[in-house]
Image: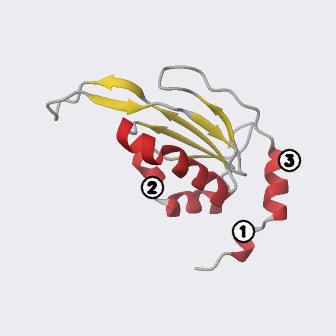
């Protein structure tokens, strides 16, 4: 619990597993935070799509900080490039803030009333079938 809501934490590769986010939402999460190091290749192809999907399907804010730049990889012969593009996404899937492929600070206003309105208008968890 925080002053702005209940926060769930996942890291990097966890983003690919919606069940984890579903479980955090079931435990009351309103905001997901996600530090990551998606590579340039996987970031370009999947990063924003996965972030928006988790926000939309769980009706939660997503605050995702992704590493950017070139990095030495001791277990690989080449340096590794990460994607960057840290983002804040609202429960409707709108990107409120997106950084480029460079360090920076992402800032956005989170609106708990808007989040509750989305959840009331589309009560996904009452309709869920497993």
Q: Is residue 108 above or below residue 128?
A: above
Q: Residue at x 58, y 62 (%)?
A: 22
Residue 21 % position (x, y)? 56, 57
Tally of numbered discs: 3
Q: Secondary structure at mark 3?
A: helix
Residue 4 % position (x, y)? 74, 38
- Whole-angstrom CA distance, mark 3 to mark 1, is 17 Å
Q: Secondary structure at mark 1?
A: helix
Q: Nearer the viewer, residue 70 or 74?
A: 70
Q: Residue at x 40, y 39 (%)?
A: 38
Occupied quadrant, residue 53: bottom right
Q: Is residue 74 above or below residue 17?
A: above
Occupied quadrant, residue 54: bottom right
Crowding near pointer 3: few (<14 within 10 Å), some, many (20+)?
few
Q: Which mark is residue 124?
A: 1
Q: Is residue 122 left or right of residue 87?
A: right
Crowding near pointer 2: few (<14 within 10 Å), some, many (20+)?
some
Identify residue for label 2. Answer: 16
Mark 2 and mark 1 residues within 8 Å of each other at the beta carbon:
no
- Closer to the chain start, of discs 2 and 1, is 2
- Closer to the chain start, of discs 3 and 1, is 3
Residue 128 % position (x, y)? 66, 75
Single out the mark in the foreground, 3 or 2.
2
Q: Which mark is residue 113?
A: 3
- Whole-angstrom CA distance, mark 3 to mark 2, is 28 Å
Q: Is residue 8 above or below residue 76?
A: below
- Whole-angstrom CA distance, mark 2 to mark 1, is 20 Å
Res. 49 in view: yes
Q: Quadrant of the C terminus?
A: bottom right
Q: Is residue 42 above or below residue 79?
A: below
Q: Secondary structure at mark 2?
A: helix
Q: Residue at x 37, y 32 (%)?
A: 82
């Amino acid at each position: 619990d925080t002053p702005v809501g209940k926060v769930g934490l996942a890291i990097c590769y966890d983003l690919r597993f919606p069940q984890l986010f579903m479980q955090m939402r079931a435990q009351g999460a309103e905001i997901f935070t996600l530090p990551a190091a998606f590579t340039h290749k996987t970031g370009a192809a999947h990063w924003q799509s996965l972030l928006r999907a988790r926000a939309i399907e769980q009706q939660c804010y997503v605050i995702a900080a992704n590493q950017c730049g070139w990095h030495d990889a001791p277990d690989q012969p080449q340096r590794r490039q990460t994607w960057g593009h840290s983002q804040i996404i609202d429960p409707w899937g709108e990107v409120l803030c997106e950084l480029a492929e460079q360090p920076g600070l992402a800032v956005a206003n989170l609106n708990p009333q808007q989040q509750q309105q989305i959840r009331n208008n589309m009560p996904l968890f009452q309709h869920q079938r497993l």
